[in-house]
Amino acid sequence: MSVSLRGLVLVALLGGAALVSGACTPYTVVQQSGPPSALLGVQEVQVRFDWSQVRLLGKTEAEYLAEKSAEEQQDFAKIKGETDAAILEGLAGEVGGGVRFVPGTTQPDPATPSVVVQYVDVQTGIYTFAFNMPSKLLARFMWAKGGQVTDVIDAKAMVGADITTPSDHQRMEMAGRSVGKAAGRFLLSAQGK
């Protein structure tokens, strides 16, 4: 390899590394409290999941499910529950034992810090030998304290559909854990950790 070609390869590799390192934040801040952060010192967080605003392949959930069989509708309901659980797992795993996350289905108690995970855009994906489509997930985390939204972030993940990840259940769980971890990193950052 000539010196100039080696130099060109080195520049390309360093440029690629710079692009990757510049994209280290796994979330986008929409609204942030502080300083000091409203999330500073939080030890318990109520977690609620909201699928009411989700878009699936450009459709509302009702429109998307109207095109599905009863079996496919039940399968999607299962995917939703698995994705919720995976987000909770990623969130708790990233933060560690310092904060307790309590899932709930009702309106959070205003006296307790809370986060609503609002699903924005979901593509469960598909894997076949002839056609593949990745699983994608975009979720908005709306943190509240004292009944007021204080911090908002967006987190997204994409998991490719291939022979190692053929199941949409598997891919959506992976995407859920990924966005949960991103939200956990935001919470740790807000707490100065």
Image: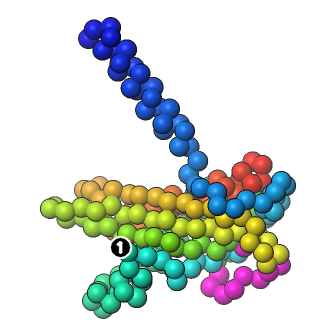
In this view, the residue in front, 124 or 36, is: 36
Q: Secondary structure at mark 1?
A: loop
Left or right of 88 on screen, residue 113:
right
Q: Amino acid at mark 1?
A: Leu
Q: Nearer the viewer, residue 10 or 170?
A: 10
Position of residue 172 measured from the top left corner of the image (x, y, whole percent) = 41, 67
Q: Main secondary structure of the magenta part?
A: loop
Residue 84 falls left or right of residue 43? left
Res 90 visible: no
Q: Give the residue pinned by disc 1.
A: 57
Q: Position of residue 31 (x, y in %)?
A: 69, 62
Picture residue at 30% right of the left edge, 14% below the top: 5
- Span shown in magenta: 104-114
Residue 163's place in the image compared with 138, above or below, is above
Decide if residue 114 is in sight here: yes
Q: Does residue 109 show up magenta in the picture?
A: yes
Q: Looking at the picture, tell me which residue is in the foreground, 165 or 156.
A: 156
Tell me: 171 left or right of 26: left
Classify residue 190 by image quadrant.
bottom right
- Position of residue 52 measured from the top left corner of the image (x, y, whole percent): 52, 83
User: Measuring 43% from the left and 76% from the top, which residue is drawn there?
Assistant: 55
- Density class for disc 1 (Cα within 10 Å; few <14, some 14-19, many ≥20) is few
Residue shown at 54% from the left, 38% from the top: 22
Q: Residue at x 53, y 67 (%)?
A: 139
Quadrant that contains the N terminus: top left
